[in-house]
Image: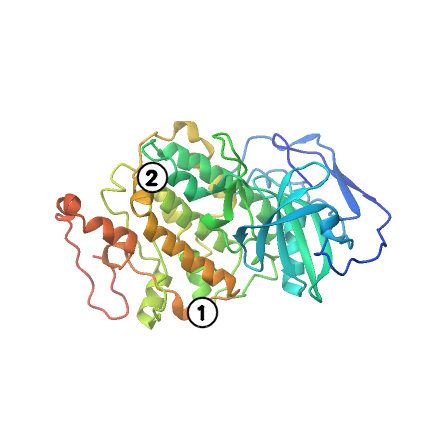
């Protein structure tokens, strides 16, 4: 039973070992990874509800230690013995594609991720397994190791997230109001996943809308984080330095010598929150556009705006929270504990129910937004990102297709006609004055 947290309490755990399955490997099947160790959780110790400004709910108990996890043991009989695999592609992850499959015993619809057996793939499996069952994290059901077309593969059977992507769900709302309070609730759920990962000394490193999926299409569906292809362990003496990321959500330190650690996830939270509140991103990537030294510097300066009319009615508390998340200096950036204890996150019931432009912007500019996502997916498929493809500008001076298309509409020209923006002539800066 994967580790889970229930109603804010932690109970400890014990591990039992099962005799491994030494059956012959099916050379025609696809890999099967299933653990032969099982962790049973017992909950009794309350974490309480009082937190200081620099500690998260998971960190508030001084004697709370990361649980002991079972050693990974992969099932070696064919995954097709247990699951019927269809040709339906559900998604494309960092390291491999995800297919639809059905459990032969129960008929349950699941998601099957297929990875070629490499050290990187095994790291992804291990870290995802370690946090599987945590709050708002996609759950692993079975793990397999099989031969497929002469190559050893790893297969991850996960719960099927039938509700789809976060932003697709918002687009589907049509004229139904999408409010600031709802954004607060969504960010709280995402924050819970990041809080759990960071407590386990794991940085996700690719937190973005495409990796945030709903369990079902129902209104009460749960939002969960997936795809641990870039995830890494991080400790006090081993900050993350590998330059792998998705361009739209890249933290500025990734483009320089600073160490790449958990604070990158916080930067991504700021970008996601920004998009949820207006419908377009503060930073973006242009396909085929080389990055100049000046543009690289503006990335590191973290220049962005809160333009009207999209931001006119958004609360000052929300804007200030984004500013704290998008600090370019990682040491100044808000931690996950501070984020979860911020009133705008922890007290969502008092966040104003202000209608936002988000749903309309995403719907009207759906074609452009899909192009943005397609570019990001391509970057993920290559399992690497070329620094020179990343390009970030101020929103009011950029070629951001989502924003510019809307601003060129005749009905909106009057809204923007009063904006007078000047720029520093310094070639290394171009700050908005």
Q: Position of residue 286 (x, y in %)?
A: 34, 63
Left or right? Give the position of 7 relative to 79.
left
The front one of 19 and 218 is: 218
Q: Is residue 45 left or right of residue 169?
A: right
Q: Residues within 10 Å of mark 2 (few under 14, many from 20)?
A: many
x then y, percent, for residue 410:
14, 47
The image quadrant that residue 185 belongs to is top left
Q: Quick one: SS at disc 2?
A: helix
Which residue bears the numbered disc 1?
A: 386
Quadrant for the N terminus, please. Answer: top right
Which residue is pictured at 41% across the width and 47% down the height?
A: 272
Q: Quadrant of the C terminus?
A: bottom left
Residue closest to the eye, 322 or 228: 228
**Label 1's element?**
loop
Rendered view: 256 above or below 348? below
The image shows residue 292 at horizontal and vertical percentages of 33, 72
Percent position of residue 248, x then y: 40, 57
Q: Left or right? Give the position of 430 relative to 334.
A: left
Question: At x 43% / y 55%, what residue is drawn?
Answer: 249
User: Which dot marks residue 359?
Assistant: 2
Give left or right: position of 84 versus 309: right
Q: Is residue 278 visible?
A: no
The correct choice, above or below, for 16 with respect to 205 in the image is above
The residue under the point 69% across, 65% down is 149
Q: Residue 227 — which label?
A: none
């Amino acid at each position: 039973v994967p580790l889970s947290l229930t109603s804010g309490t932690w109970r400890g755990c014990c591990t039992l070992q099962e005799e491994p399955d030494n059956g012959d490997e099916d050379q025609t099947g696809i890999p099967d990874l299933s653990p032969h160790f099982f962790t049973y959780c017992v909950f009794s110790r309350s974490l309480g509800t009082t937190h200081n400004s620099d500690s998260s709910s998971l960190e508030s108990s001084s004697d709370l230690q990361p649980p002991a996890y079972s050693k990974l043991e992969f099932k070696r009989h064919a995954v097709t013995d247990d699951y019927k695999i269809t040709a339906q592609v559900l998604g494309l992850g960092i390291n491999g594609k995800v297919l639809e499959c059905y459990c032969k015993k129960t008929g349950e619809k699941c998601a099957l991720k297929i990875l070629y057996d490499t050290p990187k793939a095994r790291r992804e499996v291990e870290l995802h397994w370690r946090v599987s069952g945590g709050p708002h994290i996609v759950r692993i059901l079975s793990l397999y190791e099989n031969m497929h077309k002469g190559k050893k593969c790893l297969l991850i059977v996960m719960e099927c997230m039938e509700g789809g992507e976060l932003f697709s769900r918002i687009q589907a709302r049509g004229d139904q109001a999408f409010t600031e309070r709802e954004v607060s609730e969504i960010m709280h759920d995402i924050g819970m996943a990041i809080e759990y990962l960071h407590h386990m000394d794991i940085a996700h490193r690719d937190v973005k809308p495409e990796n945030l999926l709903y369990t079902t299409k129902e209104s009460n569906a749960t939002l969960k984080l997936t795809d641990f292809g870039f995830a890494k362990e991080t400790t006090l003496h081993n900050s993350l330095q590998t330059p792998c990321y998705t361009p739209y959500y890249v933290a500025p330190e990734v483009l320089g010598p600073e160490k790449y650690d958990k604070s990158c996830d916080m930067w991504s939270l700021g970008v996601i929150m920004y998009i949820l509140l207006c419908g377009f991103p503060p930073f973006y990537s242009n396909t085929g556009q080389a990055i100049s030294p000046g543009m690289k510097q503006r990335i590191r300066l973290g220049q962005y705006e809160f333009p009207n009319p999209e931001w006119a009615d958004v609360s000052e508390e929300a804007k200030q929270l984004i500013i704290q998340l998008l600090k370019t200096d990682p040491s100044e950036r808000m931690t996950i504990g501070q984020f979860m204890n911020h009133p705008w996150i922890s007290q969502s019931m008092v966040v104003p129910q202000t209608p936002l432009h988000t749903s309309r912007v995403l719907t009207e500019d759906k074609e452009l937004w899909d192009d943005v996502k397609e570019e990001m997916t391509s970057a993920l498929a290559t399992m690497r990102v070329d620094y020179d493809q990343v390009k970030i500008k101020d929103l009011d001076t950029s070629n951001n297709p989502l924003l510019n298309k809307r601003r060129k509409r005749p009905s909106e020209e009057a809204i923007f006609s009063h904006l007078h923006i000047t720029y520093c002539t310094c070639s290394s800066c171009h700050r908005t004055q």
